[in-house]
Image (cartoon, rainbow, N blue to C red):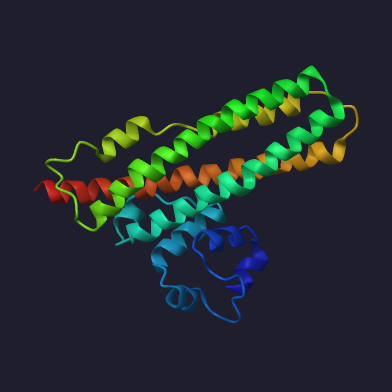
Amino acid sequence: MLDLINENPSLLLLMEYFEIDHAVNDMTVQELCRKNKIDLDVFLIFSNLYNDFHPNLQEVMGTDLDVQVIIKFLKNSHNYYKNDKYPEIKQYINQLYNHQNSSDVKRVEVFFNDYFNEVLEHLDYEDKVAFPYFKQLSEQKVDIKKCVFSSNEYRVHHTDIETKLSDLKNLLLKHISLNKDYILRRKLLSALFELERNLNIHSIIEEVILLPLIEEIENKLKR
């Protein structure tokens, strides 16, 4: 595991989502997962995402992935977005506005605040509505024939929170001129690029991995 982290430090964030201590000693991936009671297949598929290897549906459906572990991972990633990454980006924008006090930076601030409110609504919907249903479904504690919520409803309402983030990044790169402040601008853009990549992985986990698993459980319970 140590070798993998040295090759790709973004795995530290993945470990944080799994609530795994970064002090890995000389453990193999299998030993690390066993110690932390993490589904090995889930860990490997998610790790490959952080190494830019994307799974296909056949790979996902061919394994008995632990839905509970996936939900735990996603909920922890939500906490990272809400309490860490978005506040960091907001702080950078506020600092820029304090330095520049220009209408362009004000546009960026307003754009980001509107976007962040949409993100919070998206994450709250998943945390309070979708994930509890998925969890109960995986535990077979749902009467599927009487339940008004379903994976299909989630799929319909699953919003794309990456597009506006990309718009903000491109706005800064194409149209917003700043008087020096290169260091702060670089920090802001780096944070946006990092978040964009993380959100792309997040969406793949939800749409390519979690939803097909949930739909498979629903189909089994309907029989």
Nearer to me, 72 or 201: 72
* Left or right of 121, for residue 193: right
101, above or below 134, in the image = above
Q: Residue furthest top?
A: 103
4, above or below 199, in the image = below
* Left or right of 31, for residue 137: left
Q: Residue at x 56, y 61 (%)?
A: 16
Quarter-wise, where is residue 15 in the image?
Answer: bottom right
Residue 199, given in percent of the width and then of the height, sits at: 54, 43
Q: Residue at x 62, y 29 (%)?
A: 113
Q: Residue furthest right?
A: 180
**Residue 207 seen by the camera:** no
Q: How many marks?
A: 0
Nearer to me, 64 or 168: 168
* Left or right of 197, for residue 92: right
Q: Residue furthest bottom?
A: 26
Residue 189, given in percent of the width and then of the height, sits at: 73, 38
Q: Residue at x 64, y 29 (%)?
A: 112
55, above or below 109, in the image = below
Residue 49, given in percent of the width and then of the height, sits at: 51, 53
* Left or right of 109, for residue 202: left
**Residue 220 seen by the camera:** yes
Residue 8, given in percent of the width and then of the height, sits at: 64, 61
* Image quarter in which the N terminus is found: bottom right
Q: Residue at x 52, y 58 (%)?
A: 17
